[in-house]
Image (cartoon, rainbow, N blue to C red):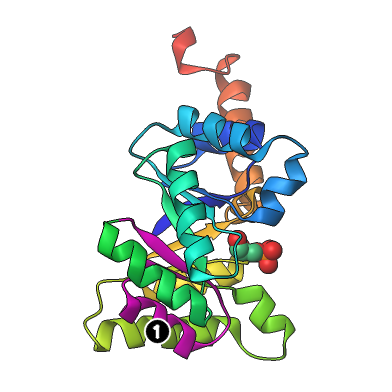
Amino acid sequence: MKLLIDDANLADIKRLYDLYPIDGVTTNPSILAKTGSDPAAVLREIRAFIGPDALLFAQALALTAEGMVADAHRILEICGKSTIVKIPSIPEGFKAIRMLRAEGIATCGTVVYTPMQAFLAAKAGASYVAPYVNRIDNMGYDGVKVVKEIQDILTNNHMDCMVLAASFKNSQQVLELCAYGVGSATAAPAVIDALVKNPAIDAAVQDFVHDFEKATGKAAMTEF
Ligand code: G3P
């Protein structure tokens, strides 16, 4: 499973890239707005840091297919041709995905709350579909179950489209989808940190250092 950062804060992105095996960065208009900076400048900075070939997702804002296509062209001008354009999985979005596919521009059908949205976005030619796990949970449904169903639909219909599971609020949601083998997941920095946050692990690591230091008087192998 590919693991991406769902955030546009460059300091957080740099910290997580330094520590974890990260495959890319996803953004949406709300995430870019949260930075308080010029969105184009933010996207350029992220692209410059992660490199020209790393996965970067940015979302079209228009509500018509023609507007979404125009937004896609601008997004590619700003952050490079390898950028994947997120298109809302609504009727105008399916049309835009088909138009962009004809131009060879990669898209992600986003704002996916139902399996049929994902199916239609994939059928229209999206390279990724992004179901919102936690938001589905908050509607009284089972977000993880919906994502598994979407993964099954893509697999059983032999569709050349990958799940990009999004909107996580806890590590259990990520774990379940990782075990199921979904193609990719994007999560906020706090959720990525929480994947391995465990006092028992920290205590075990500290115990090794204390035991060694007590016996040898030294705290590092480099001192020998
Ligand atoms: O980028 C889309 C998705 O990740 C939104 O997440 O946390 O706003 O529900 P959230």
Q: Is residue 162 visible?
A: no
Magenta segment, which residues? 105-129
Q: Quadrant of the C terminus?
A: top left
Q: Is residue 98 visible?
A: yes
Q: Which residue is mark 1?
A: 120
x and y percentages locating residue 126 in the rendered image: 36, 69
Q: Is residue 224 magenta?
A: no
Q: On the picture, is 194 further left or further right than 2?
A: right
- Which residue lies at the image location 59% right of the left edge and 73% below the top edge? 132
Q: Position of residue 196 (x, y in %)?
A: 58, 52
Q: Residue at x 49, y 28 (%)?
A: 49
Answer with the quarter of the image where residue 107 lies: bottom left
Residue 7 percent location from the top left of the image: 63, 48
For label 1, count other residues whose C-alpha is less than 10 Å away and answer few (under 14), some (14-19) or many (20+): some
Q: Observer-nearest residue: 92 or 109?
A: 92
- Name the one closer to the observer, 223 or 184: 184
Q: Residue at x 68, y 82 (%)?
A: 137
Quadrant assignment for ligand 1? bottom right
Q: Does 160 appear above or below 190?
A: below
Q: Nearer the viewer, residue 114 or 79?
A: 79
Q: Quadrant of the N terminus?
A: bottom left
Q: Amino acid at mark 1?
A: Leu
Task: Say which element carries label 1.
Answer: helix
Residue 75, above or below 132: above
* Above or below, comparing residue 142 to residue 121 in the picture: below
